[in-house]
Image (spheres, rainbow, N blue to C red):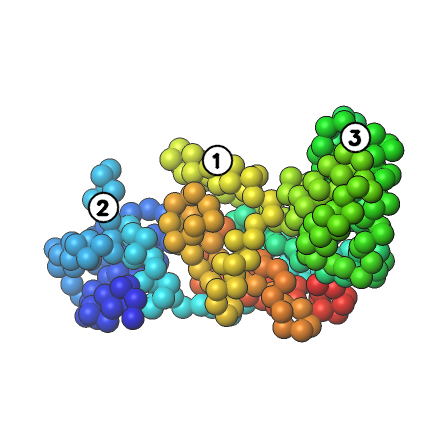
Amino acid sequence: MSDAAELLSQMNERSREVFRRVVESYLDSGDPVGSRTLTREMTEKVSAATIRNVMQDLEFLGLLDSPHVSAGRIPTQLGLRMFVDGLLEVGDLSDSDREAINGSLGSKESDVSGLLDRVGSALSGATHGASLVLTPKHEAPVKHIDFVNLGPDRAIVVLVFADGHVENRVFTPPVGQTPSSMREAANFLNAIIQGHTLSELGSVVAREIAARRQELDGLARALVESGGAVWENEGATYERLIVRGRSNLLEGSTEEELDRVRSLFDDLERKRDIAEFLELAEGGDGVRIFIGSENKLFSLSGSSLVVSPYMNADRKIIGAVGVIGPTRLNYGRIVPIVDYTAQLVGRLISDRGQG
């Protein structure tokens, strides 16, 4: 039993009701909740003094906190965790939310990245948070590779897959590349890639370079050896993590919250391809909720992440969708939206035979 669950089991009915009403009011308004407000809402008639005593006990247990500017209380991170684990009532997906998500997927186009971009926009619109969509890595064998020089420090690698899928990834090549060295590097790679997926290429390239080092000049070898960053997508403009709805996090934020939001934006910019995001989603079945510092992915302690993996036709987890926002998210409404979106994306990708 978790610390939060154990505390909940020790509380009497009055304490539970006071605690639940404080949390629900805070999630709804973001404001501290006072004892006088609760006297009008309680099931049984109790005085404000009695409620203040209960709130003090809950504060002593670490479940509520009293902001210095207010006599009211707000839930702590431990309190929110206890509420989510033991008292949260998850509603059914509303017809309007279902229509909003379904509407983003109306196109029959086969471009999965475009589809997932629209999913992210619909998810952020429905939840009024920032949406995160981790797109699946393409696991079909690579058929052909080509390099296109864009300037002294920019180039494109064109990846053609056996199933006809094509990706163009911008990257920073090693210094001094020439059209000749790029052709040589591409020829070398095309001779060894047949039948291999991107995730296999790193080890194949390393093995072949060791065996055939003399066949490549220095510049071409440097370009081939730098390919690991391209295979893994580091620094590329091709995004595996699609972030939409950032402006939603700015609306109605206090000065203190704005600093946290800027910190979150910085984290998102640095982590376009977040393996840890998928690991969070893979850690349990269905939707998972990370509150404040439980979320090791971002340095933003005042945020919550609601995330769910999605699977392909083989029931293999290949990506994830989530919503991030302040800790006072409407969890009961957002959980079914994220769950529905993840299941829908998994079905659509399975239908397209991708992932």
| Separation of residues labelled 2 and 1 (CA atoms) | 26 Å
x, y percent for residue 122 = 63, 54
Point out the tag, 1 or 3, that comes first from the N-terminus: 3
Q: Is residue 281 left or right of residue 164?
A: left
Please give the count of numbered marks on the rendered protein: 3
* Residue type, numbered disc 3: Gln
Which residue occupies 83% across, 34% down? 181
Point out the tag, 2 or 3, that comes first from the N-terminus: 2
Q: Residues within 10 Å of mark 2 (few under 14, many from 20)?
A: some
On the image, numbered disc 3 is attached to which residue?
A: 177
Indicate which disc residue 66 carries: 2
Instruction: Mark yes or no: residue 127 visible.
Output: no
x, y percent for residue 346 = 65, 66
Q: Is residue 64 left or right of residue 133?
A: left
On the image, numbered disc 1 is attached to which residue?
A: 262
Which residue occupies 71% across, 66% down? 348
Point out the tag, 2 or 1, that comes first from the N-terminus: 2
* Residue type, numbered disc 1: Arg
| Separation of residues labelled 2 and 3 (CA atoms) | 61 Å
Residue 260 lies in what quarter of the image? top left
Q: Nearer the viewer, mark 2 or mark 1?
A: 1
